[in-house]
């Protein structure tokens, strides 16, 4: 049971003083820092990529990895299933807060990046070119 | 009383007056195992003690009422006897449950009716003490007292609480004498935190307010931080969630994901478990119920 009320108006004290009794409040400083970090006025605040991209001019000025376009491609169900499995597998190996950062789009982006780098370096001997040639050259 | 089966850890809420005096063993309805009861109580058999939890934060729009209603109804679904107390002048807990009680908390505090007459049974095992505009009358009752006004709510709710396993109190946004009363009554606080800077600002202020109450009510503890409106597409939310987990550790519950079903359910007067039992919202609130009861086997 709480402390027996004495003959002072506790509510008045709490409502008017607003003081917290002088005792240190755990994690208050950390929370205040967190607020500063995510406040839009703070130059350190992580900038929202989406808001930057809302302007066509800004999207041209941004580095290429921020400049994304939606594309549609037909994928076989085997590749689709593999993509789904890879997404879930990689997410399982990531810490809680980062899990949802890994999306199918991101995996496709990384995979294509790897293949195209290989293609730029080896040309006709690259994995991509060899796979296509093997499939269509009889 | 609550009896926990030592075999499957399922908790059963039992009316002790209906148990014959010569019973020494009982069978779990869930796993069908027998275990000792009565004089030779197993360690799992707990005597009754009500848990009083306030769902509170001075910032508005963070999901207080949604959380209070879905936590209370989830606990009731799990077999606990639950009293949901709405101390908000908006009185939306009743609306969310599709109920239209004509009496509520005001009548209890102003002694217009007997305590039992003020209760409204909203669902099986779930009772509601409704709020609404009339709560202005409660605030007047508190204001009129020269001293001891902070205990007004506690004095009126205490005679009722023995019938329940949980009392969940939904509060209004802001900081007023009624919220002070709630914090003098409950022993645990659940703070819904929508993952945005404005809410963090509200959280800091609210922590200071809690601290001012703890000076007089030391057993009051911040027990749960419930992240709400988690939207993985919004970059900052995961950063804030991470930091909260770092700062508060086990006190942080599984986040409630942004879910359109949660916003639709009230219009139908249904809880999320009734409206969209398979939705993310329902699953996230089931997780909260497991966390609050400490029973991971609930709803499995």
Image: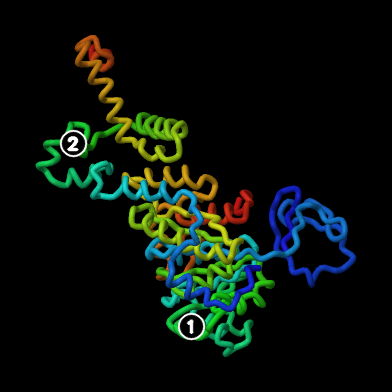
Vertical relation: A87 (above or below) B282: above
Residue depicted at x 27% and y 20%: A115
Does residue A114 appear left or right of residue B250 in this picture? Answer: left
Within 10 Å of the Cα at label 1, are there few (<14), some (14-19), or many (20+) other Cα atoms?
A: some
Does residue B181 sit above or below B251 in this rendering?
below
Q: Circle 1 marks a residue in which chain?
A: B
Q: CA distance from mark 1 to mark 2?
A: 60 Å
- Asked if badges 1 and 2 are on one and the same chain, I answer no
Q: Quadrant of residue A121?
A: top left
Q: Is residue B158 left or right of residue B210?
A: right
User: Residue B284, percent across and down?
Assistant: 49, 53
Q: Which residue is depicted at the point 38% across and 65% down?
A: B60
Q: Disc 1 marks which residue?
A: B143
Q: Residue furthest bottom?
A: B112
Q: Position of residue B128 (x, y in %)?
A: 55, 75
Q: Relative to B73, is B45 on the left or the right?
A: right
Residue B194, numbered circle: none
The nearer-to-camera label among 1 and 2 is: 1
Residue ranking furthest to the right:
B22
Label 2, residues with CA under 10 Å away: few <14, some 14-19, many ≥20: some
Chain of the residue under label 2 = A
Residue B167, percent across and down? 59, 68
Would you place residue B247 above or below residue B106 in this image? Answer: above
Observer-nearest residue: B239 or B176? B176
Q: Which residue is mark 2?
A: A67
């Amino acid at each position: 049971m709480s402390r027996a009320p004495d003959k002072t108006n506790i509510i008045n004290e709490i409502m008017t003083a607003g003081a917290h009794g002088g005792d240190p409040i755990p994690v208050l400083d950390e929370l205040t820092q967190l607020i500063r970090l995510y406040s839009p006025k703070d130059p350190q605040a992580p900038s929202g990529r989406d808001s930057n991209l809302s302007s066509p001019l800004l999207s041209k000025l941004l580095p290429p990895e921020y400049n994304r376009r939606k594309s549609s491609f037909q994928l076989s169900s085997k590749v689709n299933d593999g993509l789904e499995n890879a997404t879930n597998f990689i997410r399982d190996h990531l810490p809680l807060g980062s899990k949802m950062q890994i999306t199918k789009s991101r995996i496709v982006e990384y995979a294509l990046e790897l293949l195209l780098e290989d293609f730029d370096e080896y040309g006709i001997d690259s994995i991509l070119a060899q796979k296509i040639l093997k499939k269509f050259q009889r | 009383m609550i009896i926990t089966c030592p075999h499957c850890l399922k908790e059963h809420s039992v009316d002790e007056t209906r148990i014959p005096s010569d019973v020494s063993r009982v069978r779990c309805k869930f796993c069908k195992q027998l275990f000792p009861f009565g004089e030779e109580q197993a360690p799992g058999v707990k005597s009754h003690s009500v848990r009083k939890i306030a769902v509170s934060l001075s910032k508005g729009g963070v999901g207080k009422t949604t959380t209070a209603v879905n936590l209370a109804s989830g606990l009731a679904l799990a077999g606990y006897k639950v009293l949901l107390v709405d101390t908000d002048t908006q009185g939306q807990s009743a609306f969310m449950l599709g109920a239209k009680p004509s009496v509520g908390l005001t009548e209890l505090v102003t002694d217009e009716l007997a305590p039992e007459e003020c209760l409204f049974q909203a669902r099986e095992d779930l009772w509601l003490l409704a709020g609404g505009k009339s709560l202005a009358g409660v605030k007047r009752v508190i204001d009129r007292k020269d001293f001891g006004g902070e205990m007004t709510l506690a004095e009126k709710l205490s005679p009722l609480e023995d019938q329940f396993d949980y009392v969940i109190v939904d509060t209004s946004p802001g900081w007023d004498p009624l919220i002070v009363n709630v914090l003098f009554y409950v022993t645990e606080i659940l703070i819904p935190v929508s993952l945005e800077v404005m809410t963090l600002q509200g959280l800091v202020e609210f922590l200071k307010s809690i601290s001012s109450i703890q000076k007089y009510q030391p057993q009051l503890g911040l027990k749960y931080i419930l992240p709400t409106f988690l939207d993985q597409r919004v970059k900052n939310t995961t950063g804030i969630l991470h930091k909260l987990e770092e700062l508060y550790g086990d006190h942080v519950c599984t986040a409630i994901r942004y879910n359109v079903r949660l916003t639709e359910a009230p219009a139908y007067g249904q809880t999320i478990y009734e409206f969209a039992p398979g939705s993310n919202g329902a699953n996230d609130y089931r997780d909260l119920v497991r966390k609050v009861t400490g029973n991971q086997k609930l709803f499995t």
